[in-house]
Image: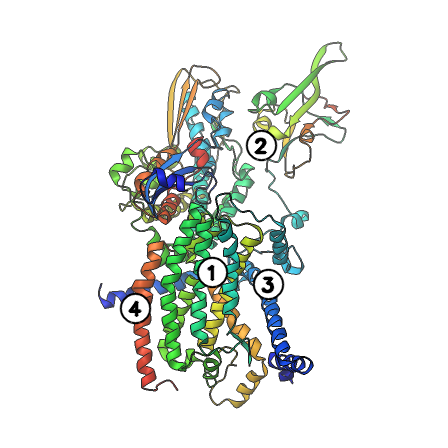
Amino acid sequence: MHQVLSSTPEGIFTINVGPQHPATHGVLHLVITLNGETILKIEPHLGYIHRSIEKMCESLTYRQFIYVTSRMDYLSAHINNHACALCVEKGLQVEVPMRAQYIRVIMDELTRLASHELWWGAMAMDVGAFTPFFYAFRERETINEIMEETCGARLTMNYMVPGGVMADIHPQFQQKVKQFIAGYKNKIAEYNELVTGNVIFQNRMKGVGYLSTEDAISYGCSGPVARASGVACDVRKRYPYDVYAQVQFDEIIETTGDSFARYLVRIREMEQSVRIIEQLIDNIPEGDYQAKTKAVLKLPKGEFYQRVETARGELGVYIVSEGGTTPYRIKFRSPGFSNLSALNEMAKGGKIGDLVATMGTLDLVIPDIDR
Amino acid sequence: MSIQQYIKNVFNAVKTLLKGMRVTGYYFFHPKEIITQQYPDNRATLKLADRFKGEVVMLHDENNEHACTGCTACELACPNGTIKIITQFDITPDGKKKKALNTFVYHLELCTMCNLCVEACPTGAITMAQNFEHSVYDRKQLTKILNKPGSKIRAGVE
Amino acid sequence: MLNTISFEAIKTAVQQWLNMHWGPHLAFIAECILIGLLVIVFFAVLGLLLVFMERKVSAVMQIRLGPNRVGPKGWLQTSADTLKLMLKEGLTPDGADKFLFNLAPFLIMIAAMLIMVPIAFARNFQIWDINIGVLYISSIASISVIAILMAGWSSNNKYALLGAMRSGAQIISYELSAGVAVITMVMLTQSLSIQDIILSQQNGWWIFKGHIPAIIAFIIFMIAATAETNRAPFDLAEAESELTAGFHTEYSGMKFALFFLAEYINVFIVCAVAAILFFGGWMPFHIGNWEGFNHIMDYIPSSIWFLGKTFCLIFLIMWFRWTFPRLRIDQLLNLEWKYLLPISLANLLLMTIIVVLKWYL
């Protein structure tokens, strides 16, 4: 330590948070310059879990590459797959059957719920409350069980395929989802009682990690992080895909831009997800769950881009096709990367405790940042 | 901050804290809410979903016959090179050579349970099993041969 | 009768036996050694029990089962953990100040052991009825902060240093309001001796007799006690999501276990002090003139009363821990200096008025 002290001005020192640290939820490495407890600068170091997914995708066919994307943002695996499937469909000019669209959107929203659930638990754990984590996981478990029954897996489902979904929903799917939704509303009230209303929690969150609207836009933030700063950027609303254009839901926007606003946006988004599922679950139309596609998919020469709203923000899939069976180049625009870049802006000048609260509300998934 | 505001703050703070304690207190006095599953103990009653993707298996009927024609559609569909199909040429009764399955090699250690091989199979020869306890002491044991010894293709499957 | 096998009777019998067989000096030395051994054994048992209790309480609150594999219902889990910790290598980092690094865990244990001296576990059963008992407890309690600072500084680890500094600021601040809360009660008892404090509650515990000021003092004391023992929501010194493990980041094996044990012993002690000050220590629960009821209450041994009260308070502190999020360092100090201290000072004034006007009987 004395070496660091001698090379920097009096009282200023750096600490490494990560790559192994309880607050970073993965192998993120932050180099933090501190003056006592006050943060002067944060420098994220990335790449600890880089698996070159984009390059891998170039050697896989358009059916095969979708499964890899579950491993990027593993908490919104469905939504990642959805984005890829939509992008390939765009290239193929395939009309997806209504039934498949409904199933996809319900699955997306269930995934979003599960993801926000985990975020809520981990967020509470970051600021020191352990118990909410288990309550969150109880609900997440129910969702995972529903997923397991229909998709055959709990985390990396690979259920979306170009042209629809891989299999029809399980006969009990609708009933189980309705049962879950019915009990879920009380659970949100319980969450609010346990964490949201808590005076300690509010003090930890309010006025912490402020991000202005201009900064949110200039850093390219998206999802709840940007919406908490007053940027209307919900892809489901702005550029609707599948049946999102037909369902009623609110785009949650807060304007305070602090950690508590980001927290509230996610909590209220959970309510909106419930609302979307309620509208769709009874009205799943009969019909095919998958459009007829060729055994070997070939995208025409050109460039295709599709964006979706994952639990973390805007995920973009950009495919460059040379007309072959595999993409020439694939680029994913991941929400976590841009959101992380704003961390320095948010946490600068705060305490170490604030950094944890801020990072918790960013809802970082490290494999999503590194890919 | 006026005195009134100060006292109100204190009371509100205490109220929110007590609310939180009520939630945890409720669970403390209602042990029925415990959701822990004691996994290795409940093996007998553990029921996995029918569609659960645990590993790829080849379906054999009671005559030790399967439906695999050795067409390698699954091998092509697999993104990880998990499946390797070794084919041979059978001589059919009318004297023609016919491609048939010799060995269906399945590398469980490479498999991501994406289900693409099952989807690709034109004859429904393979499916996903619900077994999930795959741990072994030697990695070699994870390389499996799916067609049972002495099995042959079911008559009529093309 | 139950009274014949009370702690008091055992103590007297042992004392008599020693004095009869050996000379008074030798008997005194033997008694000291015996007490030392008893305290160590008590600590070990208490540590195992409290860790197990915490794990079970937290488990049920978190809708899970908690330890249930080692021994019947998991009762031997903490013993197995202790065994593991003892067998682990006690690592000393290269750049550490080796002497202080190894001294700190023992210092924190010694501080915890010293506080045990004036605590009355049962009727006439305490190590030493020192006449400044309460003052002694508050002064010895502040030694532990030295051990924490020592551990944080000597580890040569920035996380540890930050944790120790937080802990220093925290303990020193919260000692004030804990002290004022204690003084509020001393106003009533008019004595610093633990024995006198307990005896003054013969006809009712202070929490009932002391009107609202006693209740406020109790709440403030519990908050300050939670903070002083570095437990959530005031566990900033070891805030794991921020500082990994705070001041004991670099400790391992038995040295880590000593810190861990000291935390639980301190929890026991502050709860015991609260039980003595506000709930009459080993005094049974009596209601005014209900002779029959009071008689039944007297049948319950005094040690059960004391331990029962203490464990109820320990449960309360555990309940806090598993419900609340952690405060930030500046909020922690705000809470003390802007809320707890002014309120407890006003409370002290109120109590003085009550005592002067003799409203408390």
Q: Which mark, residue C342?
A: 4
Q: Which mark, residue B113?
A: 2
- The quarter holding residue C236 reads bottom left
Q: Which mark, residue B121?
A: none
The residue positioned 48% from the left and 40% from the top of the image is: A20
Tell me the crowding category of disc 1: few under 14, some 14 to 19, or many 20 or more residues within 10 angstroms, Cα based: many
Question: What residue did someone put label 1 on?
Answer: B24
Image position of A167 (left or right of C191): right
Tell me the crowding category of disc 4: few under 14, some 14 to 19, or many 20 or more residues within 10 angstroms, Cα based: few
Q: Quadrant of the C terminus of chain B?
A: top right
Q: Secondary structure at mark 2?
A: loop
Residue type for callout 3 = Ala
Q: Secondary structure at mark 3?
A: helix
Instruction: Give the CA distance from mark 4 to mark 1.
Output: 30 Å
Please state the horizontal and vertical placement of residue C259, each as a whole percent of the image.
Answer: 52, 57
Instruction: Give the CA distance from mark 1 to mark 3.
Output: 29 Å
Please state the horizontal and vertical placement of residue A96, each as a whole percent of the image.
Answer: 44, 28
Q: Chain of mark 4?
A: C
Instruction: Give the CA distance from mark 1 to mark 2.
Output: 39 Å
Q: Secondary structure at mark 4?
A: helix
Please state the horizontal and vertical placement of residue A38, each as a whole percent of the image.
Answer: 32, 47
Residue type for callout 4 = Pro
